[in-house]
Image (spheres, rainbow, N blue to C red):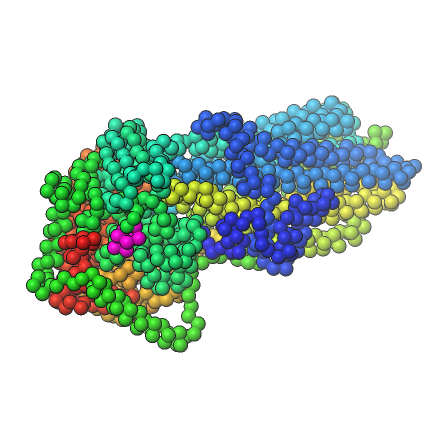
C-alpha cells in the first residue's frame, strides 16, 4: 500500500462515516443523497466536484463519501444474511442462488434503469416516424405555420426525453454495477480469510486474486447488458411498425435482412469467445510467470538467469499473440458487418420495393433510412450481449465454486474460557493430516499436556513435523481423530515472516491501541530500537511489499514484537531465532522468553540446541511422531534422536573450544558482560551522534525519503503527445494517412448514397419519377459497395497498426524492466509492474486501437452531418459556431476532473488487490490473532475507496454528456426553425428532409464522440504508464565487448575492496561508509555483525546489484565495475539467504540455462544429499516443483541452492546466511560439502551461527557500515575485549548452561 492520505488514514482508523472535516467538504460529502429533484435530473449535484477539479488536481480527500447503499459497509452484511437465508450454508450455494440474491439486493436500481431504457427507446423512434409528415408539410403549397412549429417542437421534445432517459439509465446501471462488484469483492475477501489450507493449496494466489480483479468486475460490468435482450426486441418491433407504414410489404424483407445480419454475427461472436478464452488462458500463464520473476528477481540477477526467464515470458507471449491476432481479425469482421448493416438492409428493402412495384417517395425513404440507423444498434449488440452473458455465467460459476470451497474445520480446537483449567494445551491421541485424501498422516498419535506458564521446546530434523505441530494447535490443520483443547488467547510467529506493507508501527500494534510504555518495552525486548534509529523515519518508515526494505532478521523481530504486543496467554513461536545473529538471538531469548513471557505459556521450535536447557519440557520429533519428551538432562540419556541433534551441535562447539585456550577463558557473570557490550554500543552511539552532528552541519538539509514512493501519476493533460506517440509507433506512422483517407472516403460515400436516394425520388405519390428505377438502384448499390470497401480498408488497417503497436510496446516494456537495477524492484511494489503487464497491456492489445481510430472516424462523421444540415439551411452555421465553442469549453472544463478521477480509479484498485494478496499469504497469522473482522473492515474501506472515484467518474461523464446533448439539440432545433420559417422556394423539400434525418442523429453521434473521447482518455493512460516503464534507467551492460574478462578469470579469486561507499537510493543514507580490506585468494572469510550492519549490502555490491557511490572492488586485479555484469555474476556463486525454487522441474531448478548433462546434475544432487530424495520421486529429474517450491521443505530448498553452486564450480563462493532455516545436522552437511568441494576457492560466509565461521581463516566484524575488526579468529579470540570474543563467550556460556541458571 502506498503512503496514506488523510482520508485513507481516517478510513483505516474506522471513521468511514464519521468525517471530522470542514463544512465545505461536508457539503460535497453527501451531495447526491441530499440533492433536489432538478439537481438530480440535470446531474447538477456533480457541479461542485467538477468545478473543484478545474481549479486544482483532485485528490481522494476531495471526493464525496458514498451513500450507505453504495458502500461495501452498507451492503455487505445484508447481502451476506440474504445469501445465508437463501441457501442455508454457503457450501450449498448454486449460481442461481447467487444471481437471485444479487438481483433482490439491487432490485430497485435494476427496475428503475429498465423503466428509463423503455422510455428512451420509445422516444428515439418519434423522429423517424414523423420525417415523412415533415417532408410532406414542406412540400405543401398552402401550409399553416403553426403546424410546422408543432412538428418541430415534437422532434425537439422527443430528442430531449431520449437524452435525459439515456443519461439516467447509464447512471443507474453504473450505480448497480459498483454495488454488485463491491458486494462480491467483500464476499470473496471474507471467504479468503476462512479458507482451509487444503483449499488454498488447490488454488494458487494468482487464481484467487483473479476472482477479485477479473470475475467480480466482469459481473459488475454485466449490469450494462442486462436489459439488452428485451430492449432489442422492443427496438425491432417499433422499427417494423414504422417500416410497415413507409414501405408496406417490403418491411418483411427489411426484417429478413436484419435477421440475416444478426445470424452472420453469431458464428463470428462464438469464435471470438473461443479466441478470447484461449487468450485469457495464455495471459494467465504469462502473468504467473511474470509474478514469479518479480518475486525472485534478486536470485535471477545473482544467477544471471533473468534473460532466460524473460525469453520464457516472450515465448508464452508469442503463443498469446497467435490468439490475439485471430481475435483482432474477428473484431475487424464484426466491425465491418456492423458498419455496413444499415446499408445492406436498405439495399434489400429498396430493391424489394422496386421489384414489387411499391412507389418510392423521398419522405418515406428518409423515414426508412432513419429507422435503419437505429436498427443498427440491436443488430450489433445482440451477439455481444450473448457473449457477455456467457462470460458472466462463467465468472459466477467460478465465484460460486470458490465460495463453496472447504473452510477451516471449526471443531479442530476445543476452546476453553480463560481461567477454566490449569492446562493451557492438551492433545490426546491426536492424528492430523494436511491432505485428507492421502493415506499418510502428517502427525501421528500426538499426546501432550502443557500447563499454564510452561516453556516447551520442540526440536527435530528437517521435515519431522515441528511446524505442523504448531499449526495444528492454532487449528489450521485438519484433524482425523483425537481431542485438542486450548485454554486462552494465542499469538503466533510464523517461520517465514509475514509483514504487511505499511508502517512498522502498524505492523507491531496490529490493530491494538497504542500504549507507549508497553510499546517501548516490546521494542527494547526485540532489540528493534537500534534498527529504528538507522531507518530514515523510525517506526513510521513504510515497509515495502513483503517487508522488502527490512533484512531477514529485522522482519523476524518485527513479527516477534507484533506477537509480544498482543499480550496473549499462549505463544507459539516457529523457529524465531534462526534469522537473527547469535548476539541478537540470545538477547531475544533472554528478554522475550525468559523475561516478558515468563508467566506465559510458550511453545517454541528451535534448531539451536543452546536454547533447549531452559525449557520445562522438550519434545523431540521424528517423522510426525513425538519420539521423546522430558527435561533436557532426562532425555539426553534416554534415546538416540535427541543425542544425534546434540552431538552435531557438540561437534560444532568443540571447534570453538579448540580455538580458545581454555585456561585463559574466564566465565564472566551475565551482568558484567552485558554492561561491557552495552558500553560498547553506547560508545559507538556517542561517536555516531558526533558524526551525525557534523553531517548535519555540512549539509543542513539531509535528504531522507521513504523507499516505496507513491505511485507516480502524471498530472495535467495527457495531451496529443501520448496519442501521437501511440499512433506513430507502428511502422513509424506510415499507416496513419491511409487510415484517415479511408475514413473520409467511407463517410463521403455513405452521405452520397443517401443524397442520391433523396434527390432521385419524387417527393409525393402524385409526382412522376425523373429517373428509372433500375438506374436508381444501380447507382445506389454501387455507392453502397464503394463505402463498404472503404470501411473494410479502415478496419483492417486499424487492426494491423494496433497489433504492431501492442507487440512493440510489450517487448520494450518487458526488456526495460527486466534490465532495471535491483533498486527499482525494491522501491516498486510488484503489483504496479503486474498491473502494467496485465491490465494496461490488455487495454493496448484489445481496445485502445479501436477507440483511437473510432474517435477520429466519429470526428469525420460529425463534420459530414453538419455539412448536410448547413446545405439545407446555411443559417445553421451561425448557431453552430458558438455551440462548438461552448462544447469545447465544457469538454476542457470537465476533462481536468475526469482525468484525475480516472487516474484515482486506477491507483485505488492496486491497494485492494495488494491487501487481498497479503491477506491470503498471511491468513494463518491473521486467524491465530483472531483479527479477521478487522481485516474484513480494512478490505471494505479499500473497496469503497476504489468505488468512489469509479462511481463519480461515471457520473461526471453523464454530467458532461447531458450538457453537450443540450447543445446539439439546440443546433437541431435551430435547423428545424429555419426550415419551417423560410418559404418553400428556398429549400428543396427532400434535401430539407435529409438534413432532419441527420439532425436527429446529431446528438447521438456527438455523445458517441464524447464517450469515445473519455474512454480513450482513460485508456490512453495505459499507454502513458507503459511508456513510463519503457524508459527505466537500466543496469550496467550485460557484456562489454571491449572489456571481456579472460575465460579463466578469476583464476585465483582474490577480492580487494577499496574505500567502498554504498547507499540504496539517492535519497537514503549511506549503508557502507568506506570499507577497505582484502579477501585473500582461496581463504575462507566469515563476515559477522549485528542485523543491519551492512553484511548483505557488501555481498550485493560484490555482485553489483547495487553500484557503489565511491570506491571500487577488484577481483584478481580487475575492477569489477568495468566489465559486463553477466560476465561478473556468471563467474561468482552464491547460496542466498532465502532459498528459492521456481515452478517447473527439479532439472529446470538446478540448471535453467540447460548447460549441464544429466550425469553432472545427479552428481551435484548426490553431493548435496538430495540424490536419494529425488530418486524416490516418480519423475526423477523431471518431477514437478510447485509455485515457490512449496512441495519441498525449507531445508530441502536450501540444499537445492547448494546443488546449483556445486554445478557452477566458481572460484568465489558467497554463503549469505545460508544456514538460517536449517537444523544443525543439515547445516553440517552444507559446511562439510563446502569444505570438501571448495577447498581452493575463496569462500565468503555471512553467518549467524558462530560455529560456521570459527573455522574460517579470517573474520570481518562489521558495525554500522564500518569495519570494526578484521583478523584471524585465533587472534581475535585471544583478545578478550574484541567483539568476536564477546560473542563467542556468550555463545559457549549459553550452550553449556542455558539462560535460566
Q: Is residue 593 left or right of residue 218?
A: left
Where is residue 194? Give x, y as percent.
Answer: 41, 36
**Magenta highlight range:** 590-597
Is residue 733 shown to the viewer in this render? Answer: no
Above or below residue 1266? Residue 93 is above
Above or below residue 514? Residue 464 is above
Above or below residue 1246? Residue 469 is above
Q: Is residue 719 left or right of residue 1069?
A: right
Q: At 37% from the left edge and 38% from the top edge, which residue is drawn?
A: 417
Where is residue 122? Give x, y as percent.
Answer: 72, 32
| Chief secondary structure of the magenta portion | helix
Q: At 29% from the left edge and 31% from the top edge, which residue is drawn?
A: 483
Q: At 34% from the left edge and 72% from the top edge, which residue is drawn?
A: 689
* Among the 4 quarters of the image, the one containing residue 826: bottom left
Where is residue 557? Give x, y as percent.
Answer: 32, 54
**Between 1207 and 223, which is closer to the camera in this rendering?**
223
Amino acid at each position: 500500500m502506498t503512503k496514506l492520505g488523510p482520508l485513507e488514514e481516517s478510513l483505516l482508523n474506522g471513521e468511514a462515516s464519521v468525517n471530522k472535516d470542514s463544512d465545505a467538504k461536508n457539503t460535497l460529502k453527501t451531495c447526491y443523497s441530499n440533492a433536489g429533484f432538478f439537481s438530480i435530473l440535470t446531474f447538477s449535484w456533480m457541479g461542485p466536484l467538477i468545478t473543484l477539479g478545474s481549479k486544482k488536481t483532485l485528490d481522494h480527500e476531495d471526493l464525496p463519501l458514498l451513500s450507505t447503499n453504495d458502500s461495501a459497509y452498507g451492503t455487505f452484511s445484508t447481502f451476506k444474511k440474504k445469501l445465508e437465508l437463501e441457501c442455508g450454508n454457503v457450501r450449498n450455494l448454486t449460481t442461481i442462488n447467487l444471481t437471485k440474491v444479487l438481483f433482490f439486493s439491487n432490485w430497485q436500481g435494476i427496475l428503475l434503469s429498465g423503466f428509463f431504457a423503455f422510455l428512451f427507446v420509445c422516444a428515439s423512434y418519434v423522429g423517424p416516424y414523423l420525417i415523412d409528415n415533415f417532408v410532406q408539410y414542406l412540400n405543401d403549397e398552402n401550409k399553416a405555420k403553426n403546424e410546422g412549429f408543432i412538428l418541430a417542437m415534437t422532434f425537439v421534445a422527443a430528442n430531449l426525453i431520449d437524452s435525459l432517459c439515456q443519461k439516467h439509465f447509464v447512471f443507474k446501471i453504473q450505480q448497480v454495477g459498483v454495488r454488485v462488484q463491491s458486494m462480491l469483492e467483500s464476499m470473496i475477501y471474507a471467504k479468503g480469510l476462512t479458507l482451509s489450507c487444503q483449499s488454498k493449496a488447490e488454488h494458487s494466489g494468482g487464481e484467487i486474486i483473479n476472482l477479485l480483479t477479473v470475475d467480480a468486475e466482469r459481473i459488475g460490468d454485466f449490469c450494462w447488458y442486462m436489459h439488452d435482450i428485451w430492449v432489442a426486441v422492443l427496438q425491432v418491433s417499433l422499427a417494423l411498425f414504422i417500416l410497415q407504414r413507409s414501405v408496406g410489404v417490403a418491411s418483411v424483407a427489411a426484417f429478413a435482412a436484419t435477421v440475416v445480419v444478426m445470424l452472420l454475427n453469431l458464428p463470428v461472436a462464438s469464435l471470438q469467445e473461443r479466441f478470447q478464452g484461449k487468450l485469457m488462458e495464455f495471459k494467465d500463464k504469462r502473468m504467473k510467470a511474470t509474478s514469479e520473476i518479480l518475486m525472485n528477481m534478486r536470485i535471477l540477477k545473482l544467477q544471471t538467469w533473468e534473460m532466460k526467464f524473460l525469453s520464457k515470458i516472450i515465448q508464452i507471449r508469442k503463443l498469446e499473440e497467435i490468439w490475439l491476432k485471430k481475435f483482432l481479425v474477428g473484431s475487424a469482421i464484426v466491425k465491418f458487418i456492423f458498419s455496413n448493416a444499415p446499408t445492406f438492409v436498405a439495399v434489400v428493402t429498396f430493391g424489394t420495393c422496386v421489384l414489387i412495384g411499391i412507389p418510392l417517395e423521398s419522405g418515406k425513404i428518409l423515414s426508412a433510412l432513419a429507422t435503419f440507423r437505429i436498427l443498427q444498434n440491436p443488430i450489433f449488440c445482440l451477439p455481444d450481449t450473448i457473449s457477455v452473458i456467457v462470460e458472466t455465467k462463467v465468472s459466477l460459476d467460478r465465484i460460486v465454486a470458490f465460495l463453496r470451497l472447504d473452510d477451516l474445520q471449526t471443531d479442530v480446537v476445543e476452546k476453553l474460557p480463560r481461567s477454566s483449567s490449569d492446562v493451557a494445551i492438551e492433545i490426546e491421541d491426536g492424528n492430523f493430516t494436511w491432505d485428507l485424501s492421502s493415506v499418510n498422516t502428517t502427525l501421528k498419535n500426538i499426546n501432550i499436556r502443557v500447563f499454564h506458564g510452561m516453556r516447551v521446546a520442540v526440536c527435530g530434523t528437517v521435515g519431522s513435523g515441528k511446524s505442523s505441530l504448531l499449526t495444528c494447535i492454532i487449528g489450521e490443520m485438519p484433524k482425523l481423530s483425537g481431542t485438542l483443547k486450548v485454554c486462552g488467547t494465542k499469538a503466533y510467529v510464523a517461520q517465514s515472516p509475514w509483514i504487511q506493507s505499511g508502517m512498522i508501527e502498524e505492523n507491531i500494534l496490529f490493530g491494538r491501541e497504542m500504549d507507549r510504555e508497553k510499546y517501548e518495552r516490546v521494542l527494547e525486548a526485540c532489540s528493534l530500537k537500534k534498527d529504528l534509529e538507522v531507518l530514515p523515519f523510525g517506526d513510521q518508515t513504510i515497509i515495502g511489499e513483503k517487508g522488502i526494505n527490512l533484512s531477514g532478521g529485522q522482519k523476524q523481530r518485527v513479527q516477534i514484537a507484533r506477537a509480544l504486543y498482543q499480550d496473549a496467554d499462549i505463544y507459539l513461536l516457529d523457529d524465531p531465532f534462526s534469522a537473527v545473529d547469535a548476539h541478537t538471538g540470545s538477547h531475544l531469548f533472554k528478554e522475550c522468553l525468559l523475561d516478558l513471557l515468563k508467566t506465559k505459556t510458550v511453545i517454541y521450535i528451535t534448531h539451536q540446541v543452546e536454547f533447549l536447557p531452559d525449557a520445562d519440557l522438550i519434545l523431540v520429533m521424528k517423522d510426525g511422531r513425538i519420539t521423546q519428551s522430558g527435561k533436557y538432562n532426562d532425555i539426553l540419556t534416554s534415546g538416540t534422536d535427541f543425542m544425534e541433534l546434540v552431538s552435531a551441535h557438540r561437534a560444532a562447539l568443540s571447534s570453538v573450544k579448540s580455538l580458545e585456550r581454555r585456561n585463559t577463558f574466564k566465565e564472566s557473570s551475565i551482568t558484567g558482560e552485558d554492561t561491557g557490550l552495552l558500553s560498547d554500543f553506547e560508545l559507538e552511539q556517542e561517536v555516531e551522534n558526533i558524526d551525525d552532528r557534523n553531517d548535519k552541519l555540512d549539509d543542513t538539509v539531509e535528504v531522507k525519503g521513504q523507499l516505496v514512493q507513491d505511485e507516480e501519476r502524471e498530472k495535467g493533460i495527457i495531451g496529443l503527445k501520448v496519442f501521437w506517440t501511440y499512433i506513430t509507433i507502428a511502422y513509424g506512422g506510415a499507416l496513419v494517412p491511409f487510415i484517415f483517407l479511408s475514413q473520409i472516403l467511407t463517410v463521403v460515400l455513405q452521405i452520397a448514397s443517401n443524397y442520391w436516394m433523396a434527390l432521385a425520388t419524387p417527393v409525393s405519390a402524385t409526382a412522376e419519377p425523373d429517373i428509372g428505377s433500375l438506374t436508381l438502384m444501380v447507382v445506389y448499390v454501387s455507392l453502397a459497395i464503394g463505402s463498404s470497401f472503404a470501411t473494410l480498408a479502415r478496419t483492417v488497417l486499424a487492426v494491423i497498426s494496433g497489433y504492431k503497436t501492442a507487440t512493440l510496446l510489450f517487448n520494450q516494456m518487458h526488456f526495460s524492466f527486466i534490465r532495471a537495477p535491483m533498486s527499482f524492484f525494491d522501491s516498486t511494489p510488484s503489483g504496479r509492474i503486474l498491473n502494467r503487464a496485465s491490465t494496461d497491456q490488455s487495454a493496448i492489445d484489445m481496445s485502445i486501437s479501436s477507440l483511437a481510430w473510432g474517435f477520429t472516424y466519429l470526428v469525420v462523421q460529425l463534420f459530414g452531418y453538419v455539412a448536410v444540415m448547413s446545405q439545407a439551411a446555411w443559417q445553421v452555421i451561425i448557431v453552430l459556431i458558438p455551440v462548438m465553442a461552448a462544447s469545447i469549453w465544457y469538454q476542457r472544463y470537465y476533462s481536468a476532473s475526469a482525468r484525475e478521477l480516472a487516474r484515482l480509479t486506477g491507483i485505488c484498485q492496486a491497494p485492494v488487490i495488494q491487501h487481498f494478496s497479503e491477506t491470503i499469504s498471511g491468513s494463518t497469522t491473521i486467524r491465530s490473532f483472531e483479527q479477521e473482522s478487522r481485516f474484513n473492515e480494512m478490505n471494505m474501506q479499500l473497496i469503497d475507496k476504489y468505488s468512489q472515484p469509479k462511481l463519480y467518474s461515471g457520473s461526471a461523464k453523464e454530467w458532461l454528456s447531458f450538457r453537450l446533448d443540450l447543445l446539439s439539440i439546440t443546433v437541431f432545433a435551430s435547423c428545424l426553425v429555419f426550415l419551417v420559417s423560410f418559404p418553400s422556394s428556398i429549400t428543396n423539400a427532400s434535401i430539407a428532409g435529409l438534413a432532419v434525418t441527420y439532425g436527429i442523429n446529431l446528438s447521438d453521434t456527438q455523445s458517441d464522440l464524447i464517450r469515445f473521447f473519455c474512454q480513450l482518455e482513460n485508456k490512453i493512460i495505459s499507454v502513458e504508464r507503459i511508456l513510463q516503464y519503457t524508459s527505466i534507467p537500466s543496469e550496467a551492460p550485460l557484456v562489454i565487448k571491449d572489456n571481456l574478462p579472460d575465460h579463466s578469470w578469476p583464476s585465483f579469486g582474490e577480492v580487494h575492496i577499496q574505500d567502498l561507499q554504498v547507499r540504496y537510493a539517492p535519497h537514503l543514507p549511506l549503508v557502507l561508509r568506506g570499507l577497505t580490506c582484502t579477501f585473500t585468494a582461496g581463504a575462507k572469510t566469515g563476515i559477522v555483525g549485528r542485523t543491519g550492519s551492512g553484511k548483505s549490502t557488501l555481498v550485493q555490491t560484490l555482485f553489483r546489484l547495487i553500484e557503489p557511490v565511491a570506491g571500487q572492488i577488484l577481483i584478481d586485479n580487475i575492477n569489477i565495475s568495468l566489465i559486463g555484469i553477466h560476465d561478473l555474476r556468471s563467474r561468482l556463486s552464491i547460496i542466498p539467504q532465502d532459498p528459492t525454487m521456481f515452478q517447473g522441474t527439479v532439472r529446470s531448478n538446478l540448471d535453467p540455462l540447460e548447460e549441464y548433462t544429466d550425469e553432472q546434475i545427479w552428481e551435484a544432487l548426490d553431493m548435496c544429499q538430495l540424490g536419494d530424495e529425488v530418486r524416490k520421486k516418480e519423475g526423477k529429474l523431471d518431477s514437478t516443483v510447485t509455485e515457490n517450491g512449496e512441495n519441498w521443505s525449507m531445508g530441502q530448498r536450501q540444499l537445492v541452492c547448494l546443488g546449483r553452486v556445486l554445478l557452477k564450480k566458481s572460484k568465489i563462493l558467497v554463503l549469505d546466511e545460508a544456514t538460517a532455516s536449517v537444523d544443525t545436522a543439515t547445516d553440517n552437511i552444507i559446511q562439510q560439502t563446502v569444505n570438501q568441494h571448495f577447498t581452493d576457492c575463496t569462500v565468503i560466509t555471512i553467518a549467524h551461527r558462530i560455529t560456521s565461521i570459527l573455522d574460517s581463516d579470517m573474520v570481518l566484524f562489521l558495525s554500522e557500515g564500518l569495519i570494526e575488526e578484521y583478523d584471524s579468529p585465533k587472534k581475535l579470540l585471544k583478545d578478550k575485549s574484541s567483539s568476536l570474543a564477546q560473542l563467542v563467550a556468550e555463545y559457549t556460556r549459553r550452550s553449556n548452561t542455558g539462560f535460566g541458571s
